[in-house]
Amino acid sequence: MSISFSAVRVDDVAQSVMSLLSELEQPVIVVDRSTGQEAAISHEEIARADGYLPVIVVAAEALWFDLTGTGFGLDVRENPEATLGYTLNSIRAGSWSVVMLCIIDLFEALALQGETLCLNDLVELWGNARSRLQTVPVAPQEAS
């Protein structure tokens, strides 16, 4: 018996992230922890598969994994040309709505912490998820 999984288009998630950020109407920043200097990040950079989108989707997957024990079947690869050194190539399982609900939850949590969305707050989730994904196979979320 084979289980069928759907793929979620990275471009669809990227476009939805752009729309979500526009609705939130808050600036997005990262803070250089060594200097305390803030840098604004454009919505376009956040939504790029080789920009900040890998961090956002991995953090969203970590939320979903905590709830269900399943993942999104992410294909995130190292890319020295990418903003953070990684590119999100595909989301091989799950549904667009589940992925986006988790991303919305992330952004709402960030929005509650101040007048800006600080992406540094995702670092811990990203680090924990990368460690988990490298050592424990994650069963993909089945589309319903």
Image: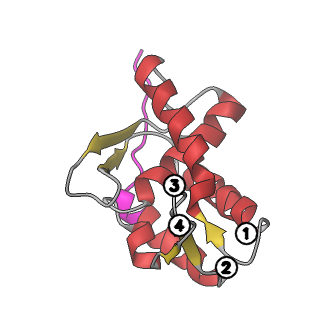
Q: Residue at x 51, y 58 (%)?
A: 34
**Disc 1, SS:** helix
Dot 3 crowding, Cα within 10 Å, few <14, some 14–19, many 20+: many
Camera-near label (4 vs 3) is: 4
Provide the residue span drawn in magenta.
1-12
Amino acid type for the residue under numbered disc 2: Leu
- Name the residue that disc number 3 marks: 56
Q: Which mark is residue 111?
A: 1
Mark 3 or 2, nearer chain start:
2
Most foreground residue, 124 or 77:
124
Q: Residue at x 57, y 74 (%)?
A: 28
Q: Residue at x 49, y 39 (%)?
A: 72
How many numbered dots are placed on residues in this image? 4
**CA distance for labels 1 and 4:** 14 Å
Left or right for 90, reference 64: left
Magenta part, dominant SS: loop
**CA distance for labels 1 and 2:** 8 Å
> In this view, which residue lies farthest toward the top?
1
Most foreground residue, 47 or 1:
47
Amino acid type for the residue under numbered disc 4: Val
Dot 2 crowding, Cα within 10 Å, few <14, some 14–19, many 20+: few
Left or right for 23, reference 75: right
Within the image, what quadrant is residue 48 found in? bottom left
Camera-near label (2 vs 4) is: 4
Q: Which mark is residue 61?
A: none
Amino acid type for the residue under numbered disc 3: Ile
Residue 40 position, x and y percent, is 50, 78
Q: Is residue 23 above or below residue 79?
A: below
Q: Is residue 68 above or below residue 15?
A: above
